[in-house]
Image: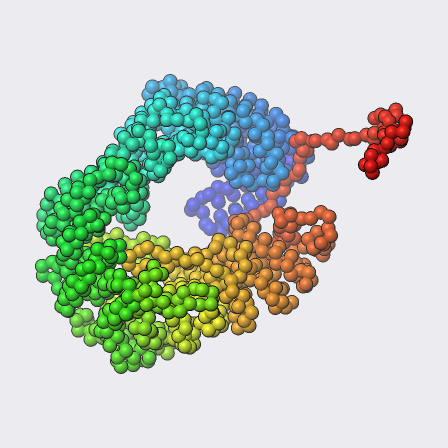
Amino acid sequence: MESQVSVMVPTLVSAVETVMNPIAAQQDRQSAQQILEEFKESSPYCVQCGLKLSQYYDNPVARHFGLQLLEHSIKFRWNSFTEEEKEQLKKSSLEIIEKGTLGIIHEQIYIKDVISRIIVEIIKREWPQLWPTLLADLYNLCQHGATQTELVLKIYLRLVEDVVSFMNLPTTRRREVLQGLTGKMEDLFEFFLNLLEKYRIDFYKTEPIVSDGAQWTQYHNNLEVSRAVLSTLTGYLDWVNMSHIFSKDLLHRLCLMLSNKHLQLSAAECLLLIVTRKGKVEERKPLLILFSENAMSLIWNSAIEADHTSKEEHYYLFLKRLCQVIIELGKQLCAMWGPVVDVKQPDTFNKYLEAVLAFTQHPGQMISSYTLSLWCSFLQHNVISQDEILLSFIPRLFETASKTLYKVGFPSQNNSPSCDYSRLEFDCDEEFNMFFAKYRSEWSNVLRLSTILNPGIAFQFANQWLQSVLSKGIDSGNDAANHCTLSSPSFLEWDAASCFLESVMSRLFVSKAENKPELHLGVDLLHSVLSFEANDPLVLSSLLSCISALFPYLSQTPQTLPVVLKKIFSAVTFSQDGQTKATRSRAVKNVRQHACSIVVKISKQYTDLIFPVFDQLYTHIKEIGRDSEQLSQMEKCILMEALILVSNKFCNFEKQSAFIDEMLKPVKDLWISQDFKEAFWSTEKFMSYIGVDRAPVEPSSADTCGINRSHISCCINTILAVMKRSKWPDNPQEASNGGFVMCSLQDGTVVYRNPATSHVSLLLENLLYLMKTMNALYHPDYLQGRHPEFTKSYEMNEIEKLTILGIPPPCVDLTQSVDSKKPVDRMQIFLTTTHDNSCHILGNAGQCLGYEFYKEPNLSQLLLNTVFTNLQNLPDFRTKLIIRVFVKPYVQHCPKDCYSTAVIPILEVLCPTFYQILSTKWQLIIQRTSEEDDNKESQEVVDDHLTRQLTKEYLDLLVNVTHDRKTIESSDDIGDEEVIQTPANPREETLSLLGQMCLKNESIYPSLLMFVYSCLSWSDTSVANRATGLCYSTLKQFHADQNITNDLALYFFRSVLKGLHTHGQHEELQSSLLLLGLQTYELLRPQYPELTQVLLQVPNCTEDLIQGFDVKLLQPNNQKQFNEKKKKDAFKKLVADIIGKSIGQMFKREIHYRDLPTLFTVSRKKHLPLDSVEPHNMGLCDLFTPSNGAPTFINQELD
């Protein structure tokens, strides 16, 4: 054997070197790799060659392969070894640790790792039953020096990772090893702490230099072992019993290590694991020792020292970890202060808050953001929020916010110390921009909570800051520019100050604290803001935000309202010198629309104040609207929304209806004109009318078709504005008195009429035919009539594509740019907004127009002939919007007595159509997936994502159709949509009336059920998970209606099994599918025995297994009833071989573990017969024999 090994080893070394040689030919490397793999799999000399190669100290690559051979042999051949071979391999492995490696400093990391894995693999097969001396053996190895100690620590770490984190052992073996570890945990922690003491490095005041020889070596040996101990502890600290952590002086030692630059990061990570522990509050109480003066001083001093060099990546990372330790410690205090009786304010609470505030003030905004959640927890805590020390920090929080709310810190800039830290944290400005939005939102929450506790100080800071800003001039930051940019000092301060003010004012009048500011201070501030003249659009926009935030003071000074409206309308008509309607910059357009939105806000929230001046407001808006060069179409529509909101205060149907008629008259005349009708009812004429069939025209002023597009957009926006804002009074009595009551239904529901219904209904026909024509634009015949240069106009815009691809939009300052879009972009915007707003109009029709809308004659047929035409050619991003924005609300708000006329006819067409469309699209996705093309074009990625989105939307629609839903309305002022809430688990709900009607309709239920069950096997986990609940609820109802045939029963069951095969690797979804499969089998098996034939097609599922399962599951008189878990486990065993696996596990070679003797054998005490225990007469018979005339027990009972 020795000679054979001697021959093989050089061959293996040569093959390894060839594989690792970067300049070797590919064919040579493949041949060498094949030699190594074949040897590893088939050679009986793996162990011998592995041990021989492990001695090649001058060739680490060959050594590594030799050690891999040993690991491979243990993993896959251990059960075939004799006991002697096992003992010999175990002994050899320990000898490698003892004297088979280089020194701790010089040995390669990958060699250390593979050595530790060898021992761990043996442990997983032998310990604790067959290797009781393991801990002693490893302890003895540590006595040989630092090198062996480090390897032993790596063994302990790798073992706990396999058992606790990765759980890659069979359940029984994992439980036994875990019991062994738990039983020895006290000894292990004592061992770890002794090593920290033995290899402590704090006695080195400075790091020795290389020339110091032995001292340098000793220092680095100690350092490596200390690192290894801390690394090993990270595998235990988050799950062991907390008594082991607190029984020794571990917390203090970790705090001491925070001052060592080499160990501080590892020590901080250990501390973080400890302070984030969950569990019983009483068990976590010892964590409060970290609030001691000594521990707090150590943490504070290490933070100060690290902060001095925190711009270096290592120290910055340490500072982040230390900040997280501080924050998590505070959260532990929140959990204990109050619920635990003897937990009160720590003596160092003031010092602790100083540390938290210091981190909050750190120029690294990521570090600062970590602290904000803790401040929120403190400020909301029932007890801590009333603590005097915490309350004393609130003014300092306001002061800190006044410095941190500035939007600075972009990695590409250098206008703040934060920029240096952002370059360590973010790769680009776009990433920082996304982070800062969340960061400012968190700060706003802190300010709101602080305002509730101390409104007086909050307003004082806001007042002082804003007055200071008002007193300054405009600093653009660029002498050559006369306007501000997004990085100009003035705008940055105005932006931060307005954010501060908005946060404070949102809670100022909600607070119940006594120290509220005097009202005249707020009124004076409002007057100061109104008197400020801003000629820069960015500054003016922030000024408008401040005015909007101060609106609550209008109730105290109604006489200020005219001044406020004058200021707002001056911003509505704001313009810069030399700019016309066509050449306005982006900043000017933004500030004008901002002002219009504020008019809507004041009209909605302060209607009582605005209503007395309604006539003047209406007259002024009409006056500025007459100037064609003044207001844009968007601005006109927004101002119209404000007027309609105020007009609702009339509470008089006739007056509101007359006003809406007046507002809509120009639009109505245009919308029902012959030109529009001809364009909307004919696709060819529409294409010509908007100019998509001819070459693009530049400039826009020369584009005559642009006027047509503008008129269409104006009409649609106006109709939408009227529909969304017109409503009947909320008070039933006012509604009745005002003439809004239409009728009462049989169930007592009062039906109200909207004053806009009669006017909007006249316009809906043309809108529906416009939708039909826009759908027809994607028909192949009409695509040929499109001018080639307008091809892009039919596609999704780039911003939405970037969102789908996960790419943040570019962070570019375009405030001073003039929106001179290209003709193709203008056409794309028109087509997109027209389609979107048309869907919004129809989606709002059900809710806003109410009962009258659903009672329109032939409504469903009209919708089918218009909105739902050419769906098979419509792109997914268009179809998705129709489902989400129109169909869902349409179904949601439909009265029950209109289901049969308004909903069912539509579903009879939609369900088969969408099943066909989505099935085809998913076949294409499956085909692409099977091709395994990792270099997909971005458009394919977008298409896949859109198909998934469309599938989710349609599935959600079916959930809404089949189950009752609640509706929550958004509170947004502009563009608010309703959000339809769906239950988390439809499986447990019964079907709604509409759902039952659908399952009895032969035109609906086949495609509905086929779609829902197809979702189970489509490669989208969220879709499949959503479908599981819907599958069972529909199946149960369908079964109750007795509509299931044999073929359908087989199809349903097969679909569930296909879903398990597709999604089996996802544990949560696998559990849901197993439950669905069990419920389906249990429901259908008694009536359809053919289901067993489906199970027989599962590998290794035999008739005997199925019969045994049926006996346990279906026998009603079975004495041993199965609970749900046992049923599910039994079913899982039947179908185990069909449950899908992840690609990483699919072809993985299975590792077999042999069962070891049980750790604890509990022998049941054998009960001997009573006559053998008590051989003499115990008198039992006498109890039932009458004696001396005494009655027996039986007689007594009878008496």
Q: Is residue 534 left or right of residue 1019?
A: left
Q: In this view of the protein, which residue sits in the foreground, 609 or 402? A: 609
Q: In this view of the protein, which residue sits in the foreground, 97 or 737? A: 737
Residue 1083 image-quadrant placement = bottom right
Q: Residue at x 41, y 73 (%)?
A: 855
Q: Is residue 1064 left or right of residue 538?
A: right
Residue 737, compared with residue 905, is above or below; it is above
x then y, percent, for residue 598: 22, 56
Q: In this view of the protein, which residue sits in the foreground, 722 or 355? A: 722
Q: Residue at x 26, y 52 (%)?
A: 811
Q: Quadrant of the N terminus?
A: top right
Q: Quadrant of the C terminus?
A: top right
Residue 714 image-quadrant placement = bottom left
Q: Residue at x 47, y 31 (%)?
A: 281
x then y, percent, for residue 608: 24, 56
x then y, percent, for residue 609: 21, 55
Q: How many marks?
A: 0
Q: What is the basis of the colouring in this image? A: rainbow
Q: Is residue 659 left or right of residue 328?
A: left
Residue 105 image-quadrant placement = top left
Q: Does the rendering let one see residue 141? A: no
Residue 621, compared with residue 3, is above or below; it is below
Q: Does the rendering let one see residue 1000? A: yes
Q: Residue at x 20, y 38 (%)?
A: 460
User: Which residue sits furthest front?
Assistant: 1199
x then y, percent, for residue 816: 17, 56
Q: In this view of the protein, which residue sits in the foreground, 524 or 581? A: 524
Q: Is residue 1041 left or right of residue 428?
A: right
